[in-house]
Amino acid sequence: MKLVIGIVRPEKANDVLESLYRNNIRGLSLSRVQGHGGETERVETYRGTTVKVGLEDKVRFEIAVSEDFLDQTIDSIVEGGRTGEVGDGKIFVVPLERAVRIRTGEADQLAVTPIDGAQ
Ligand SMILES: Nc1ncnc2c1ncn2[C@@H]1O[C@H](COP(=O)(O)OP(=O)(O)OP(=O)(O)O)[C@@H](O)[C@H]1O
Ligand SMILES: [Mg+2]
């Protein structure tokens, strides 16, 4: 299992959601974060030039998937999140040790794979 973390532009969050839904990825968490993607701004100060490191609003998706769903999860985020401009975001894939569905106690593959009729 993997935890896919996708950091995207807030204005692309809905496109990512639609793209994930079309590709049958149903379980996810989303939060608003602030991040820095390397872009800096030169600022003139009294004794010279300094660099201002700005933070931008981003949306962070967290999606736990079995290996079978990994590629389509990544593809969905790229497809929904891309504008082609600097700052489109990043995807990180992290090994996931354990997942538990609280209602049933099901673990791991059974907990991250959608169940028909109970999505
Ligand atoms: N190395 C990193 N670790 C953690 N978060 C990151 C990292 N790089 C980028 N991010 C997150 O992704 C957001 C968007 O980053 P950004 O798209 O600018 O990445 P980039 O690698 O600079 O790509 P680009 O060249 O398209 O700007 C950042 O605001 C930050 O939240
Ligand atoms: Mg950047």
Image (tube, rainbow, N blue to C red):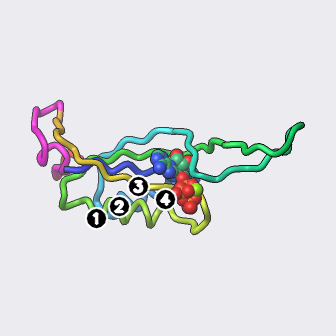
- Seen from the viewer's position, the closer of residues 86 and 64 is 86
Q: Which residue is mark 1?
A: 71
Q: Which residue is mark 4?
A: 15
- The residue at the point 43 percent across, 64 percent down is 78
Amino acid type shown at disc 4: Asp
- The residue at the point 56 percent across, 39 percent down is 34
Query: Does the magenta segment cover residue 112?
Result: yes
Q: Earlier in the sequence, mark 2 or mark 3?
A: 2
Q: Which residue is mark 3?
A: 91
Mark 2 surroundings within 10 Å by alpha-carbon count, few (fewer than 14), some (14 through 19), many (20 or more) = some
Q: Earlier in the sequence, mark 4 or mark 2?
A: 4
Q: Position of residue 64 (x, y in %)?
A: 26, 47
**Marks 2,3: beta carbons within 8 A:** yes
Q: Which secondary structure lies at badge 1?
A: helix
Amino acid type shown at disc 1: Asp
- The residue at the point 46 percent across, 55 percent down is 90
Residue farthest to the front?
47
Q: Alpha carbon of mark 4 to alpha carbon of mark 3: how far? A: 16 Å
Magenta span: predominant SS is: loop
